[in-house]
Amino acid sequence: MSVTLTATAASGSIFGAWTGCDSTNDNQCTVIMSSNKNISVSFNPASTLTITMTGSGTNAVKASTGTISWSGNTGTVVYASGAAVTLTATAGYDAVFGAWTGCDSTSGNQCIITMSANRNVSVSFTAVFTLTITKTGTGMGSVTVSTGTINWSGSTGTSIYAGGTLVILNETPDSNSTFGDWSGCDTTSSDNKCTVTMSMDKQITAAFQTPTPTSTPTPSPTPSSTPTPTPSPTAKPSPSATPTPTPTVILTITIKGAGSGTVTAAPGTLKWDTSSKIGAASYKIGTDVTITTTPGLGFKAIWMGCDDNIGNIQCQVKMNTNKSVTVEFASNKEQEHPYDFDGDGNSDALWYNAATGDVLSGL
């Protein structure tokens, strides 16, 4: 005769182990009663670990042992007293790891604790934002930042910063150019420095100009002692007009969601920061731009920030100013099997006998 015993811990305790069983499966003990048997089971004091995530972003925390049960940004897991646990924090593409509190010790993004009692730990994450810099005008020059690295593509550069970072931009015109002005800065200084605090995505423009050449008037000839006709005045050349730079604006596109897909713009070419899923392109003011998506299999595109939509595939914007568009690749599962009557994820079939009125289903 086979007997199965199941151990259930009371509140404040956790199942430990069985001894004397023929076989065990987690908290269950199986014995075959071929003779008298002696079975023992142990229970240990339980301690609850509570983990709180603060800040922004699509972030995650995993434990080296046990399974964390999450409710919003708070997770709990129960351990036997004395258990050693290592927690690892992973920031999403839109955030950076901040710090742990409440740990016995830390190592980078890891928190190490021993469960001698109920414990509470917290981990913070900081949102990241994109700084986009565009060089305009007839002149040439360079732009540098006080912290971070600018990734340039033509006359447009981007850099990623944690929220709250203070960035100072410096301009250096080439030898045949002069610096014009900044736009988009929080503040500018008398020595042409641009300061921004990265509390959101920022777009900065630096204008460089070519100096206007100075004309030299032609001197009149000196009259001789011999009477000569009065020379006609020499016309002075008109100075050349300085070409007016064509104003440009920035289109920024952000991809969100767990799905996959591609995004292109016409006209123009998007320059992507693959680590943040953000692309940007520069346009003349007044340009009409069509943004086209190709969602991955099983996903659809959801737009935000368009002037007009053509289905869920295309988004149109008129570049009268800097613009930001967001596209989310969301699940399209409800359209995969339109005839799924029993909800098993597969299309089903129905046969109807017109003579008898019988209905036969294939599910």
Image (spheres, helix red, strand yellow):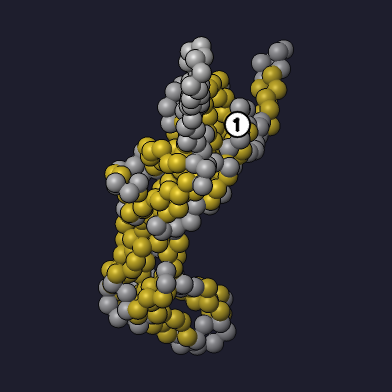
User: In the depicted view, which residue is nearer to us: 222 or 290?
Assistant: 222
Relative to 153, is 252 above or below?
A: above
Three-letter residue code for mark 1:
Gly
* Nearest to the observer: residue 66 or residue 165: 165
* Most distant residue in the front direction: 226
Determine whether, in the image, residue 270 is placed left or right of residue 209: right
Q: Quadrant of the C terminus?
A: top right
- Which of these two is toward me, 120 or 213? 213
Residue occupying the point 64% across, 38% down: 297
Establish if 205 lies above or below 111. above
Element carrying mark 1: loop
Is disc 1 surrounded by few (<14), some (14 to 19) or many (20+) residues within 10 Å? few
Residue 309 in the image: x percent, y percent? 51, 21
Name the residue rendered at 45%, 49% in the picture. Answer: 172
Q: Is residue 233 left or right of residue 294?
A: left
Most foreground residue, 191 or 86? 191
How many marks can you see?
A: 1
Q: Residue 23: give x, y in percent of width and height.
A: 56, 79
Looking at the figure, which quarter contains the N terminus?
Answer: bottom right
Residue labelled with disc 1: 268
Q: Quadrant of residue 333?
A: top right
At x 32% / y 74%, what residue is drawn? 103
Residue plotted at (38% across, 39% down): 182
**Looking at the picture, how far across and down is residue 9, in whole percent?**
35, 72
283 to 230, vertically: above or below: below
Quadrant position of residue 294: top right
Q: Is residue 77 left or right of residue 2?
A: left
Q: Is residue 102 visible?
A: yes
From this viewpoint, is residue 317 visible? no
Q: Position of residue 27 (x, y in %)?
A: 46, 73
